[in-house]
Image (cartoon, rainbow, N blue to C red):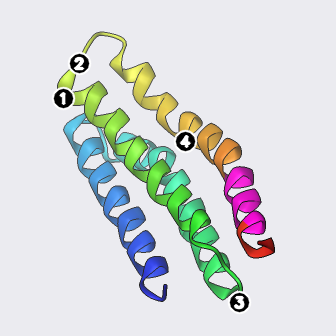
């Protein structure tokens, strides 16, 4: 159980690094454009890293919260890869900008589910 938080954090950080590579693949026209895209696309990973740090401090932390962070991170990378490499199209730029929004929605939907599963597991 002690390795689960570290593995989850590693997945989130690797996903953030991969996101930076995807931003570079977009070939922004300036350093400012790169920084803006990177900041926008990395925001969910920063939020998840902070949440994982807070979760790690809890004595009775369940692995469900860590799983949510891993799933949302991998989902964001899969979405970016699909947009940029597997099925590129003319509307790809709009879709790239929506990735953090989709990740936020996934976090909002999955975090309460993870908390409920954690409470349910400790009751029984």
Disc 1/disc 3 C-alpha distance (Å): 42 Å
Q: Residue at x 26, y 12 (%)?
A: 89
CA gap, disc 4 to disc 3? Answer: 27 Å
Residue 25 lies, in percent from the top left, at 20, 39
Residue on which disc 2 sits: 88
Quarter location, residue 105: top right
88 displayed left or right of 118: left
How far apart marks 2 and 3 lie (CA) works out to 45 Å
The disc, 4 or 3, on the residue closer to the chain's N-terminal end is: 3
Q: Is residue 90 above or below residue 59?
A: above
Q: Which mark is residue 85?
A: 1
CB within 8 Å, label 2 to label 4:
no
The answer to whether the residue labelled 1 contacts the one labelled 4, judged by CB atoms less than 8 Å apart, is no
Which residue is at the front of the view, 62 or 25? 62
Q: Are marks 2 and 3 in contact (CB under 8 Å)?
A: no
**Marks 3 and 4: in contact by CB < 8 Å?**
no
Disc 4: which residue: 103
Closest to the camera, between mark 1 and mark 3, is 3
Identify residue for label 3: 59
Please provide percent x and percent y for residue 58. Answer: 71, 85
The spot of residue 109 in percent (x, y) is: 69, 42
Q: Residue at x 47, y 30 (%)?
A: 97
* Label 1 element class: helix
Q: Label 1 vs label 4: CA separation?
A: 19 Å
Determine contact: label 2, label 1, CB under 8 Å: yes
In this picture, which residue range is highlighted in magenta?
Answer: 111-120
Please tell me which residue lies in front, 55 or 2.
Answer: 2
- Characterize the magenta stretch by its predominant secondary structure: helix
Which of pointers 1 and 3 lies earlier in the amino acid sequence? 3
Nearest-to-viewer mark from 2 and 4: 4
The mark lying in front, picked from 4 and 3, is 3
Q: Does the segment drawn in magenta span residue 115?
A: yes
């Amino acid at each position: 159980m002690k390795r689960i938080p570290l593995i989850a954090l590693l997945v989130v950080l690797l996903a953030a690094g991969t996101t930076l590579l995807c931003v570079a693949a977009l070939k922004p026209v300036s350093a400012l454009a790169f920084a803006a895209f990177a900041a926008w696309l990395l925001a969910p990973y920063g939020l998840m890293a902070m949440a994982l740090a807070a979760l790690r401090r809890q004595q009775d932390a369940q692995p469900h919260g860590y799983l949510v962070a891993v799933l949302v991170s991998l989902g964001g990378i899969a979405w970016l890869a699909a947009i940029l490499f597997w099925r590129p199209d003319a509307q790809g730029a709009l879709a790239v900008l929506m990735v953090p929004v989709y990740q936020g929605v996934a976090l909002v939907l999955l975090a309460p589910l993870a908390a409920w599963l954690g409470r349910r597991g400790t009751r029984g």
